[in-house]
Image: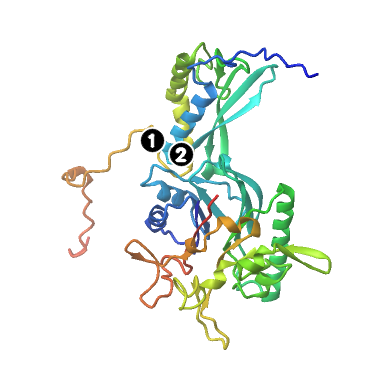
Amino acid sequence: MSTAIDDLWPVEIASVTDEVPPVTILKQQASLLGQKTKNIVEAKVETTLSDIEGVLRHTLYLVAPALNFYRHPLLDVEHKVTSMYPAFFEMPRSDIKQKKFLARDEQEFKDGLKRVFADEETKKVIGALLAQSGQESPFTKKRKSPDFTKPKSPFTEKRKGPDFTKPKSTK
Amino acid sequence: MKFLFWNIKKNSIGRVLSDIVEEHNVEVVILAECPDEIQVLSDLNANTDNLFHLSDSSETRVVIYTRFPGEYMQFEHSEPYLTVRRVSLPERREILLVAVHAPSKLHLKAGDQWAMASRLSARVREIESRVGHSRTVLVGDLNMNPFEEGMISANGWHAVMTRGIARKGKRSINKESYPFFYNPMWGRFGDDTEGPPGTYYEKSGSFIKYFWHLFDQVLIRPDLLKSFDSASLRVLEKCGSTSLVRRSGIPNARLSDHLPLLFALEI
């Protein structure tokens, strides 16, 4: 005689959340960097298990294909495997004062990322990678090209060379 | 998925390449003799939002660009004349992409080219065995014509001229088994076929002269044959209003002395 097994799981086995996981936000931003640099500098996200049990670590790398695919770890994000927020993130290689942030929810996480991306140190690194890849940084203002329509400065006029048509003075 | 292979003869081809890939919706670009990988990347991405990514080609003579991010094209093996990648896109079957730029006839005799083909094809078989499938497409400048020993011999590329033979899968010689490749380039010889008579033209003073060659080839393993539509295979002579050949029909060497190869796989 067979015995029916009671299904003790609820009909909705997962609670619905509107929050976007940190790794998704990181991947979206990684893709946007590529769009800005035309993939001369790309960003990649790698996920590993942290040294702390039950904690995930996502690392956002800047990658420069022209520099033998050099990878610069820009920031690490850690959160529990079982909950996406709070997320703790830090910039291990940065010289900025505030290297660590705690984001309690998605909005705080996005605000923190915005600060990291806008930081001069981040711009400096991306600029250096682009410059060495032979490209100008999209975050720096383009230099104005010289205006050839303006009259030349009288101080930049070529000096006249010696007039060899004149006879040399004889002493 | 559309692929383009082109030996660009170390020329800065600029817009011509990006115009070709936009015109034909190419997703994977494979170049031989690429003089500046980053400049080509900039050119490819100059006027598109669907950007190309450069894949790591540091150990090999070919350069690969893809519309999809590098995570979908895993590095499997690289050496100077050959590189192998696992193309694994979401909800599509993985394929092996083998890109080759074999040594020139200027540097190797026919027997040496055969020996090289034997070594490289053994490497491909070894990789297929390791990854557990042979849904393999091979493309490149093989620097041999389809009829040469290195191309047809069992221990060379073993590339046969009909699908029917290739569908048999493999053949055994002295109790050793060798898988076939199908080589559709056999059908592209001469002026009575679609497209130009070859992919490369060469004229010199020797007695035996073919003039046109098909050094640039695509080879398909039997397991991938159903994904390959021969009609998609084209040797390109023009892009928009830009001709890749001179008035005489031979490749315009100011762009390249080779013509580009376009093909598609339904994967």
- Residue at point 38%, 35% (across, down): A138
Instruction: For the residues labelled 1 and 2, say whether their Cβ atoms are less than 8 Å apart.
Output: yes
Residue identified by numbered label 2: A130
Q: Quadrant of residue B61?
A: bottom right
B246 relative to B160 in the view: left or right: left
Residue B35 placed where, x, y %?
A: 49, 57
Residue A80 left/right relative to B245: right
Characterize the local packing of mark 2: few (<14), some (14-19) or many (20 or more) Cα atoms within 10 angstroms.
many
Which residue, as the protein is rendered here, is positioned at the far bottom?
B207
As shown in the figure, which amino acid type bears the numbered disc 1?
Pro
Above or below, comparing residue B178 to residue B133 in the picture: below
Residue A15: name its quadrant. Answer: top right
Asked if residue B242 shows in the view, the reply is yes
Q: In this rendered view, identify the residue nearer to me: B28 or A159.
A: B28
Which residue is rendered at x = 55% and y = 84% of the image?
B209
**Res B146 quadrant in image:** bottom right
Residue at image point 44% right, 43% down: B51
Residue B147, image x, y percentages: 62, 75
Asked if residue B2 is positioned above or below residue A79 in the image, the reply reads below
Q: What is the chain letter for disc 1?
A: A
Residue B104: give x, y in percent of width and height: 60, 69
Q: Counting residues from the N terminus, which is met first, the one under dot 1 or under dot 2?
A: 2
**Mark 1 and mark 2: Cα distance apart in space:** 9 Å
Pointer 1 residue? A138
Q: Is residue A69 visible?
A: no
Q: Identify which amino acid the numbered label 2 is placed on.
A: Leu
